[in-house]
Image (cartoon, rainbow, N blue to C red):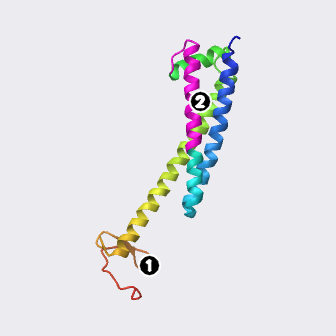
Amino acid sequence: MQRDPRNELCDLLHRQHEHGERLLGVSRAIGEALRDCDYAALDEQLDAQRQLHAALDDGGRELNALLGDCGFATDRDGLQALLRHLDNGDDGELLQRWRALREILGNCRERNHGNRVVALQGQRHGQEALALLSGANRRNATTYDASGAVQRGLGGRKLGAA
């Protein structure tokens, strides 16, 4: 049976795009779980994220195999050449699918970066709260006065006396 690289690539890009859309949804759910401190939902979404990353990686290996089988380099230039070859030009359906996939994966990266910022802020706030409660590092702990201004190095107070 003869291979049909155009249909194979079209199917692969379609599957990868579906994975990307699901990954974007999972990234949104991770952000919500982080903001809500819903750790059960966070664990569930992180598992889904790992599975989608694995599926995208598998698709990348499929793409590299297709490129190699068609005699093209397994890099961006090779992919661009294959897309132009299979589309018979520079702006065909395959190239549009590739651009759509890159766009959605870029959105996933941006969302992931935002989630990382939220997670790091939560970690920092937790560490500061623990430092205040334990009495360690009082000089470096950030607190706020009644007007909301940042105060550093406040002395400790007994619970109930604050």
The numbered mark at residue 147 is: 1
Provide the secondary structure element on which disc 1 rests: loop
At 67% from the left and 32% from the top, the residue drawn is 15
In this rendering, the answer to whether 141 lies above or below 6 is: below
The numbered mark at residue 54 is: none
Q: Which numbered mark, 1 or 2, is in the foreground of this view?
A: 2
Decide if residue 113 is on the left or right side of residue 82: left
Graded by Cα atoms within 10 Å as few (under 14), some (14 to 19) or many (20 or more), the crowding at tag 1 reads few
**Which part of the image, by quadrant, shows the N terminus?**
top right
- In front of the other: 91 or 27: 27
Decide if residue 108 is on the left or right side of residue 91: left
What amino acid type should be assigned to the residue bearing mark 1? Ser
Magenta stretch: give its range.
50-74
In this rendering, the answer to whether 38 lies above or below 1 is: below
Q: Please tell me whether the stretch drawn in magenta is mainly helix, strand or loop.
A: helix
Q: Is residue 28 inside the magenta stretch?
A: no
The numbered mark at residue 59 is: 2
At 30% from the left and 69% from the top, the residue drawn is 140
At 61% from the left and 39% from the top, the residue drawn is 104
Point out residue 55 in the picture as x, y percentages from the top left corner: 59, 36
> Which quarter of the picture shows residue 13?
top right
Point out residue 38 in the picture as x, y percentages from the top left corner: 57, 62
- In front of the other: 30 or 149: 30
Point out residue 46 in the picture as x, y percentages from the top left corner: 55, 50
